[in-house]
Each structure stands twice: as C-alpha cells, then as structure tokens.
Image (tube, rainbow, N blue to C red):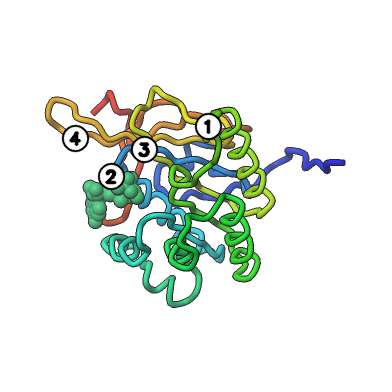
Amino acid sequence: MASFRFAGARSRVSTGIPGLDALIEGGLLPGRIYVVSGPPGSGKTTFGVQFLAAGAWHGERGMYVSLLEDVENIIYDMTTFSFKVEELISSGKLLFLDIGEMLEASAEFPTYKQLLNKISDQVKFRRVRRLVIDSISAIKFMGSDPKFEKNQMGEFFRGLQKIGCTTLLLSEMTDPERYLPEHFLAHGVVFLHNFLSDSRMLRAIQIIKMRGTRHDCNLRRLEITKKGLRVTNLLKSI
Ligand SMILES: Nc1ncnc2c1ncn2[C@@H]1O[C@H](COP(=O)(O)OP(=O)(O)OP(=O)(O)O)[C@@H](O)[C@H]1O
Ligand SMILES: [Mg+2]
C-alpha cells in the first residue's frame, strides 16, 4: 500500500541559477526527477554543476555522474566558472563519479540496473542529496520495441525516485519539436536552446513542464558568463 505525502506548503530546492527559481514558484521540489535537454554546447553540464555547487554551499552534498566524458575534463572545464569546484571537491561536498572506470573494469557498458545500484550505494554511503546524471541519452535501455524501451526507462525513473535525491538528468536533444521518452517520464523538463538568428548565436531557456508548479512557459534569454548560467528577459524583447 502506497503512503502519500500531501501537498501543503512545500519547501523548494533552489536551482542556483539566477532568474530561474522565480519562474518556478521558488525552485524544484525535493526528491523529484527533472530533465534538462539541449543541443551540444547549450549549457547542460554547466547547469548541472551550478545546481550541485549551489546545494553544496548550503549543506546539501552533490554528486555528478558522468557516463561518457572523463570527469577530469569536466572538472577542468568547470574551473573556468566561479563555482569554486575544486574547493567543494576537496571538502567532500561535491563528488564526481566516473562510470568510465566501471566500464574499464567490466569491458561492457553497465545496464541501467547496475547503474542504479552503483549510484544508490554512493548516495547512501556519502549521504548525497543532489544528483546529476550526464546523460540519460548514454544509458542503454534494451529492446527493439520502443514501448519496451520506455518501460525500462520508467523502471529507471522509479529506481531513481527511491534513491531520494533531487535529480537532474541531462539529455541530448537536437530537435526541440521531437519529444523524447524521458520528457514524458520526468516531473519537470527544461530545454536549453542554442540557435542562430541573423548570424548571431542566441542562447535561450524554456520550461516545458513542471508538475505541481505554476511556471513561466516563454523562451527566455540565457547568458553564460564566468558566474555560470543566468536567465534574463523574454527572448523577443532583446
Ligand atoms: N567561462 C565561460 N564564460 C562564458 N561562457 C563559457 C565559459 N565556459 C564555457 N562557456 C560556454 O559554455 C558552453 C559549454 O557549456 P556546457 O559544456 O555546459 O554545454 P553542454 O550542453 O554540456 O555541451 P555538450 O553537449 O558538449 O556536453 C561552451 O561551449 C562555451 O560556449
Ligand atoms: Mg556536457
């Protein structure tokens, strides 16, 4: 029998991204699973690390799980921002888990169940509260039938929910008009856009869905500076 948590005045988890919390009733709901989708270079990794760093500075330990990219490279890239990633890593408030190392040990890409076990062990052992997985696109959900694949992804989401962290799943997206299975399964979805307009590259952010939340739906300008991501005005009013 399921037990229910009734929606009262719910505390929110800050994303750590200036301008974003105000668009989603103050932040994310703790313990839920969110998807951040975007094309290459749109800011997904920066979004994830900024979210973890913000939590880490406020006592919530964060873990970034990298499936494909070497974590050394990610850490190196993130030191260009003022998140003080190295300091957070040294003090144990920010952890990076390299799934590539698991791969070297077994010579086969881990299944989503093995991945869940590995993440769950680390979360319990290190008392992690915020989780980022880079990326859900890299996880192999077996099956030639797309329905079967979605069922497996559904199990993965349920497993993650049991782990209990506030979780961001980064996802690769090349066509913002083509929704992916993870968009239906997640509690909330944020798109990062990176497109050419009159030979100028524009960055934008859009909240596609946020269950249980009144939220802004518009395309808003996204800036990336030394301080990380920042959401500003409506895109059309530039
Ligand atoms: N210090 C900085 N100041 C301003 N912009 C920066 C800085 N460092 C990186 N960027 C910009 O941020 C972009 C990278 O963002 P990020 O790595 O978070 O994207 P991503 O969506 O994770 O990319 P990928 O799909 O390749 O993993 C870079 O391509 C660059 O344009
Ligand atoms: Mg990335």
41 versus 200 height, above or below: below
- Point out the tag, 2 or 1, that comes first from the N-terminus: 2
Location of mark 3 (residue): 38
Whether ligand 1 has any atom under 8 Å from the Cβ at mark 2 is answered as yes
What is the distance, in whole Å, between disc 2 and disc 3 at their CAs? 8 Å
Question: Closest to the observer: 114 or 48?
Answer: 114
Q: Amino acid at mark 4?
A: Met
> Quick one: SS at disc 1?
loop
Location of mark 4 (residue): 201
- Point out the tag, 4 or 3, that comes first from the N-terminus: 3
Marks 1/3 in contact by CB < 8 Å: the verdict is no
Location of mark 1 (residue): 144
Q: Amino acid at mark 1?
A: Ser
- Point out the tag, 1 or 3, that comes first from the N-terminus: 3
Report whether 148 appears left or right of 108: right
What is the distance, in whole Å, between disc 1 and disc 4 at their CAs? 38 Å
Mark closer to the observer (2, 4)? 2
Residue at left offset 33%, top offset 28%: 234
Whether ligand 1 has any atom under 8 Å from the Cβ at mark 3 is answered as yes
> Quick one: SS at disc 4?
strand
Q: Position of residue 159 (x, y in %)?
A: 66, 48
